Image (cartoon, grey):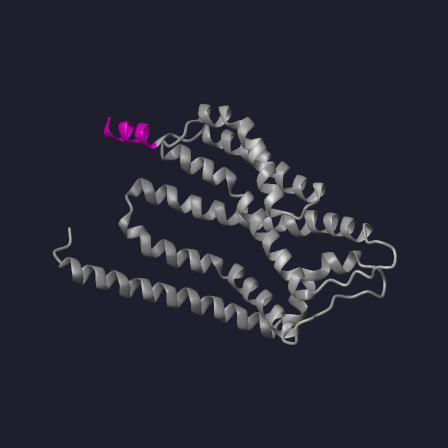
Amino acid sequence: MSDAPPQETFISHLIELRERLVKAVVAVLIVTFALMAWPGMKELYALVAAPMLKVLPAGTSMIATDVTGTFFIPLKVTLMAGFLISLPVVLYQMWAFVAPGLYKHEQKMALPIIVSSTILFFCGMAFAYFVVFPSIFGTFVGFTPTGVNMTPDIDKYWSFALTMFIAFGITFETPVVLAVLTRAGIVTVKQLAEFRGYFIVAAFVIAAVVTPPDVLSQLFLAVPLVILYEVGIIVSRFITPRSRASEDATA
């Protein structure tokens, strides 16, 4: 146990936290500036907008209704890409800050949770980009009335894409959340199985709130959410609840 005064210990923790945050921010900025150099902000935005551009009629393009939109929207995309690429460094800085205060069994549990949640979040974003976007954008374009020229605004498109990325990224975290709740002893596998029917209803309600008001988009979010809930139940069967784990360690 440390003999340092509480105030001195608190200040040292704040200093360490500041250093960790600075390192994380520097990592994000370095990657962002590197992406600005190559492949460039315009190319990154074109990559994000590709699912929409592919389904637009020939000769139709996206528009920018804001004077600064042609600069700030690609910049936002580049910043997001820089953050995602440098996410391992950011998570490591978080881990390095909290790890000394954790018990050994908590450290063993925390690292797999961080890694698996990061991978699942990227899987959710990839699912949105490669599966959801082409389908729903094609549907939207197909329902364009005669005489109407569909020219999406780049600002609104990015807002929509970012919302979908976050929604699907969080959705894919369901197995990790269930595993953590089971490990903490908050819920049991039996309770999760009994809650299945309510969760299915909740999944469709969440999909209706988060996604655009069309059945296809809601199904694309609700169905994976239900499937991942089942995966979470299966994973939770192999996890020892915290109270039982403590008893085993004591024995």
> Residue at the spot x=68%, y=44% of the render?
217
Q: Is residue 25 above or below residue 180?
A: below
Q: Quadrant of the C terminus?
A: top left
- Front residue (pair 211, 244): 211
Residue 106, x across and y down, in percent: 33, 42
Horizontal relation, residue 157 to residue 241: left or right = right
Horizontal relation, residue 125 to residue 232: left or right = right
Residue farthest along the right direction in this orientation: 146
Q: Is residue 39 above or below residue 157?
A: below
- Front residue (pair 40, 164): 164
The question of residue 248 being in magenta is answered with: yes
> Residue at the spot x=56%, y=48% of the render?
169
Horizontal relation, residue 134 to residue 149: left or right = left
- State whether residue 39 appears in this view: no
Q: Image quadrant of residue 74?
A: bottom right
> Residue at the spot x=47%, y=57% of the render?
88
Q: Is residue 209 above or below residue 200?
A: below
Count up the numbered dots: 0
Residue 19, x across and y down, in percent: 33, 66
- State whether residue 245 appears in this view: yes
Q: Please, what is the dominant secondary structure of the magenta stretch?
A: helix
User: For the magenta stretch, what is the residue range?
Assistant: 242-251
The question of residue 45 being in magenta is answered with: no
Residue 55, x across and y down, in percent: 79, 56
Residue 232, x across and y down, in percent: 51, 34
Horizontal relation, residue 17 to residue 129: left or right = left
> Residue at the spot x=60%, y=75% of the render?
37
Q: Image quadrant of residue 155?
A: bottom right
- Front residue (pair 106, 174): 174
